[in-house]
């Protein structure tokens, strides 16, 4: 036994510094004036402002550098992974999504990118072909981004994409996405000091910083990190000059833009709209990110079960013990890794339920929703099991009606 003494132990992590969010691993494809240090078309991982400066040293790339520094890293903690692919200035947003570009970056990141942004800095004198209120390239890129996202979802590596709303003119001309189905894609309209890429990367940084279930426009998250003297615009007008009817139109047509924070100095994002009908479960970024995380967890959980030998009953069905174990495995994994990101039951447990081979009669609606007409629970003949995982997401207080009046009581 050592002599009596006083031990002094320092503790760390008490000052509230931001740590990188593992669910915020991001990707950026950007067309810039001059080649970065790594060269055009070479993926790089940037985790700090210093590394960004080292890549974008040429003076012509200053606006692109500011978009990364004052956009992404203004919101995301240093140490957050930002996988970048810098392309020649003539590259369109749509061409960024070609396999030679987007697939290259996503593969380089090992499929870990959950948020992707597209931005460009065309040459001086570039005149956008404005179609439906923005550069036609934006509209084309949105469609291509949804196709790419579906491809990578099928690889169990889902992501959501934010696109710079280059060339925005006016709200009344904008394409209306209220009947569309681009759940994985959002368009960010606005600029900071006439840099619209900075606005898009600010949205990427805020999304990267907050947990998956959180609206990037949440008031309690605080005003966006924008310099006090910065000029924040939506098209040709400042946010303050933008008419309320235009802000409503932008929102209703499913775009993301700026608005004043009425609780504190500064600005917020108007909402986290994706380019799809509000009736879609994934019409907002937060629900999309929540389900994407659950997809990754489910795949990791059950991948180890592939081709395993299992006990079955006389009818070829999995034994009840194995079905229960498979249910418990995913419920535990989601409860543990998504704690606080999905709703809770009244007993405090996470609102997640797994059903393995549920009764086809009792749960006919589940099978029907999954387009399964005649479920075969005989593993000996089908080599297949059915697992339904149901998660209750967190809600968002978007419409608060307060009825205020006098009383004689």
Image (cartoon, rainbow, N blue to C red):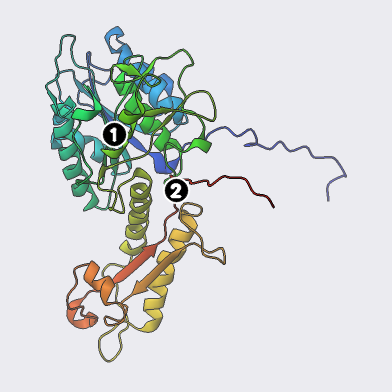
Of mark 2 and mark 1, the one earlier in the sequence is: 1
Horizontally, residue 311 falls left or right of residue 4, namely left
* Pick the front one: 298 or 195: 195
> How many residues crowd mark 2 within 10 Å: few (<14), some (14–19), many (20+)?
few
**Is label 1 in a helix, a strand or a loop?**
helix
The residue positioned 47% from the left and 51% from the top of the image is: 341
Coordinates of residue 166 in the picture (x, y in percent): 23, 23
> Based on the displayed image, in which of its 4 quarters is residue 129 positioned?
top left
**Position in image of residue 277 (x %, y %):** 25, 48
Quadrant of residue 174 within the rendered picture = top left
x and y, in percent, of residue 322 in the image: 38, 78
What's the residue at 33%, 48% (across, down)? Answer: 288
What residue do we see at 47% from left, 17% from top? 227
Q: Quick check: can you spot residue 403? A: yes
Which callout, 2 or 1, points to the residue nearer the camera?
1
Q: Is residue 295 left or right of residue 219?
A: left
Could you tell me if the residues under marks 2 and 1 are in contact, i.e. CB atoms within 8 Å? Answer: no
Q: Secondary structure at mark 2?
A: loop
Depth check, front residue: 81 or 369:
369
Q: Is residue 56 visible?
A: no
Residue found at the far front of this picture: 408
Residue corresponding to mark 2: 396
**In this view, 370 is above or below 84:** below
Whole-number angstrom distance, CA of label 2 to CA of label 1: 21 Å
| Residue to which mark 1 is pinned | 249
């Amino acid at each position: 036994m050592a002599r009596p003494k006083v031990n002094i132990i320092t503790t760390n992590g008490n000052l509230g510094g931001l740590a990188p969010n593992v669910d915020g691993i991001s990707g950026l494809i950007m067309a810039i004036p001059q080649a970065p240090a790594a060269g055009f078309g070479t993926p790089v991982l940037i985790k700090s402002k210093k590394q960004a400066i080292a890549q974008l040293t040429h003076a012509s790339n200053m606006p692109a550098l500011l978009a990364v520094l004052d956009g992404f890293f203004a919101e995301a903690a240093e140490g957050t992974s930002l996988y970048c692919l810098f392309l020649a200035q003539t590259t369109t947003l749509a061409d960024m999504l070609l396999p030679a570009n987007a697939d290259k970056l996503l593969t380089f990141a090992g499929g870990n990118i959950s948020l992707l942004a597209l931005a460009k800095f065309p040459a001086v004198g570039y005149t956008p072909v404005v179609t439906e209120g923005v550069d036609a390239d934006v509209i084309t890129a949105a469609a291509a981004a949804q196709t790419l996202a579906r491809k990578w979802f099928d690889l169990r590596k889902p992501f959501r994409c934010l696109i710079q709303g280059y060339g925005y003119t006016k709200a009344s001309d904008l394409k209306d996405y209220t009947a569309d189905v681009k759940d994985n894609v959002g368009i960010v309209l606005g600029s900071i000091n006439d840099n619209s890429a900075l606005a898009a990367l600010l949205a990427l940084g805020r999304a990267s910083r907050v947990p998956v279930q959180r609206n990037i426009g949440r008031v309690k998250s605080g005003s966006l990190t924008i310099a006090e003297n910065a000029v924040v615009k939506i098209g040709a007008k400042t946010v303050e000059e933008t008419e309320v009817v235009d802000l409503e139109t932008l929102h209703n047509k499913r775009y993301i833009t700026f608005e004043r924070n009425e609780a504190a100095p500064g600005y917020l994002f108007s909402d986290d709209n994706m380019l799809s009908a509000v009736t879609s479960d994934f019409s907002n970024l937060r629900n999309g990110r929540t389900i994407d995380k659950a997809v990754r967890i489910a795949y990791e959980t059950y991948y180890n079960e592939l081709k395993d030998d299992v006990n079955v009953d006389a009818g070829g069905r999995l034994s009840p013990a194995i079905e229960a174990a498979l249910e418990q495995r995913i419920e535990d994994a989601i409860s543990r890794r998504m704690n606080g990101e999905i709703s809770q039951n009244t007993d405090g447990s996470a609102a997640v339920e797994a059903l393995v081979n549920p009764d086809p009669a009792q749960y006919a609606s589940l099978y029907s929703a999954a387009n399964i007409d005649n479920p075969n629970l005989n593993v000996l003949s089908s080599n297949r099991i059915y697992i339904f995982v149901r998660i209750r997401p967190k809600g968002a207080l978007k419409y608060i009606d307060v009825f205020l009046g006098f009383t004689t009581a």
